Amino acid sequence: MVAKHASNLDQFRSRRKFERVEMAEQATAVFDDGTRLTCLIHDMSNGADARIGMRIELFDCPASGVPKSFLVIMKSGRVIRYTPGWNERL
């Protein structure tokens, strides 16, 4: 199991074309049912490719789980529709 995980990680790293830069910004996640959660946006790309590197960390997630997509409202006022699914694109 560990060897397989390491192999998958190596494949992921070999596909990455851009240097990762870790930046985190606090924001608010808003689900369609009105649930609001504090979250952190982790932007790990260097901006060279908009398709890679964003991860949302949710705090105090409800027992109902995370919906297929939700809004993320940043402190600057910018709104992002976030759709988890990086694992489907690997």
Image (spheres, grey):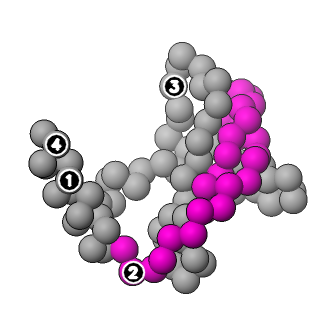
> Tag 3: Cα neighbours inside 10 Å, few (<14), some, or many (≥20)?
few
| Horizontal relation, residue 14 to residue 82: left or right | left
Mark in front: 1 vs 2: 1
CA gap between label 1 and label 2 equals: 19 Å
Q: Amino acid at mark 4?
A: Val
Give the mark, 3 or 2, whose residue is nearer the N terminus. Answer: 2
Which residue is depicted at the point 20% across and 53% down? Answer: 6
Residue at 55% across / 64% down in the picture?
44
Nearer-the-camera pick, 67 or 87? 87
- Circle 1 residue: 6
Residue type at mark 1: give it. Answer: Ala
| Position in image of residue 47 (x %, y %) | 60, 78
Q: Percent from the top left, x then y, of residue 16?
A: 37, 74
Residue 81 seen from this side: no
Q: Quadrant of the N terminus?
A: top left
The disc, 1 or 2, on the residue closer to the chain's N-terminal end is 1
**Marks 3 and 4, how far apart at CA:** 27 Å
Give, as a single range, the part of the protein colored magenta: 16-43
- Front disc: 3 or 1: 1
